[in-house]
Image (spheres, rainbow, N blue to C red):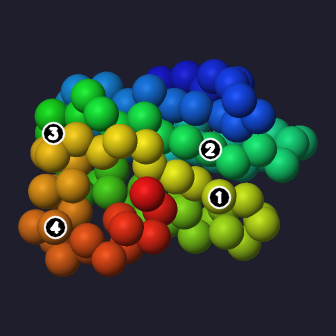
Amino acid sequence: MELKEGHGRLEVDLPAVLDLPLAADLRDTLLDALSRDIAADVVLKAALVERISTAAIQVILAAAAGFGMAARRLEVETPSQAFASAFAQLGLTAELEKII
């Protein structure tokens, strides 16, 4: 996963499968975005996600809180049905709605 600058924000295209090994990669990407000396928000493009692990969801929610403490925003753009369903299965629909 890589950060792309566009429209005054940083964007990350999430892969179709966001499993446990890729959760660590996502964490590193988001830490990189947070450490950059810019005030840009970060957008996770989630339209292509077919499967997401609980670990990846934990990374996203922790990052959202971290960005909030830095007066920045982490957003999820166009979450796929599978992406939204995974949050719902964990009882986290309200948390997802806060970052859409």
**Count the marks: how many?**
4
- Residue type indicated by callout 2: Val
**Mark 2, residue position:** 42
**Mark 3, residue position:** 51
Instruction: Give the Cα distance between marks 2 and 1.
Output: 6 Å
Residue under the image location 10 percent in, 67 percent down? 89
Q: Position of residue 60 (x, y in %)?
A: 44, 56
Instruction: Give the Cα distance between marks 3 and 1.
Output: 24 Å
Earlier residue among tags 3 and 1: 3
Q: Position of residue 97 (x, y in %)?
A: 37, 68
- Residue type indicated by callout 4: Ala
State the SS at label 2.
strand
Instruction: Locate residue 3: give its quadrant.
Output: top right
**Mark 1, residue position:** 73
Earlier residue among tags 3 and 4: 3
Q: Closer to the observer: label 3 or label 4?
A: 4
Earlier residue among tags 4 and 1: 1
Instruction: Give the Cα distance between marks 2 and 3.
Output: 21 Å
> What crowding class fits label 1: few (fewer than 14 Cα within 10 Å), some (14-19), or many (20 or more)?
many
**Mark 4, residue position:** 88
Q: Which mark is residue 44?
A: none
Q: Is residue 85 left or right of residue 68?
A: left
Are the residues tagged 2 and 3 within 8 Å (C-beta)? no
Q: Nearer the viewer, residue 60 or 84?
A: 84
Are the residues tagged 3 and 1 within 8 Å (C-beta)? no
Earlier residue among tags 2 and 1: 2
Residue under the image location 43 percent in, 35 percent down? 45
